[in-house]
Amino acid sequence: GTAVASVILKHLPEAQFVPLVSNAYDNGKIKQVDNDTFAQMIRDAVDVYHCQIINLSIGLILDKPSIREAVEYAEQKNVLVVASAGNDYATDGKFKYYPAGYDTVLAVGSVNKKENAISEFSQRGEWVNIYACGEEVTIKTLSGNKRESEGTSYSAAIVTARAARLLQKNKNLTPAELREKLLGSAQSLPDGRKYIP
């Protein structure tokens, strides 16, 4: 979360955050909250914290009804959901990750540093809506240090910042209009897929 927030702030320094933590260390291992709790966190982001954009830099292999219904609820409440597409293409290219794989979610993959091809690790397919650079991304760690990292989580952060800037200019944009504007302002890779420079 700290790393993703640092990328958003780099592109939109005035962004305001509501950090909802979906995993934590437990006996030296990262433990994810259960699906229903995760779904409730999405709903809370909408109803309790009044978020306008929800960034989900997380991926689940299975379609979970409670999470699908939660992101659909966000859309109905005029909240854009942006999610990372996943980083396992080299080993599990056939996998479609969720919540990025849901129709109402803006699924973001990664392009390389030169912005001329999809990153080798990035999931891809018709379900991935847009791409942004997820390689050699400067992030901040919990200790406040900077380092370079890679992943579609950071690509999603860039797209989240771009969407938030669009909302600054027009607070009445619906999630569908935001997706349309983001795709309309995107550039094309040689294979025709769209990316945010």
Image: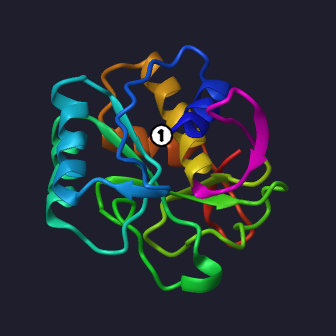
- Horizontal and vertical percent for residue 185? 59, 42
User: Which residue appears at 41% of the width and 69% of the height?
Assistant: 97
Q: Quadrant of residue 87?
A: bottom right
- Classify 169 as above or below 189: above
Crowd band around label 1 with a 10 angstrom C-alpha radius: few (<14), some (14–19), many (20+): some
Image check: 71 left or right of 17?
left
Q: Quadrant of residue 95?
A: bottom left
Name the outermost residue toward the front. Answer: 27
User: Which residue appears at 66% of the width and 35% of the height?
Assistant: 141
- Horizontal and vertical percent for residue 39? 20, 50
Quarter the C terminus occupies: top right
Type of the residue with mark 1: Lys
Circle 1 sits on which residue? 181
- Horizontal and vertical percent for residue 25? 45, 49
- Classify 21 as above or below 68: above
Question: Residue 95 or 187: which is nearer the viewer?
Answer: 95
Name the outermost residue toward the right. Answer: 114
- Classify 83 as above or below 158: below
Question: Residue 23 or 109: which is nearer the viewer?
Answer: 23
Image check: 159 left or right of 177?
right
- Classify 44 as above or below 85: above
Question: Residue 21 or 101: which is nearer the viewer?
Answer: 21
Question: Residue 78 or 187: which is nearer the viewer?
Answer: 78
The question of residue 157 being in magenta is answered with: no
User: Which residue appears at 29% of the width and 54% of the height?
Assistant: 104
- Horizontal and vertical percent for residue 62? 30, 74
Name the outermost residue toward the top. Answer: 14
Q: Quadrant of residue 130?
A: bottom right
Magenta stretch bounds = 138-152
User: Which residue appears at 51% of the width and 19% of the height?
Assistant: 15
The question of residue 144 being in magenta is answered with: yes
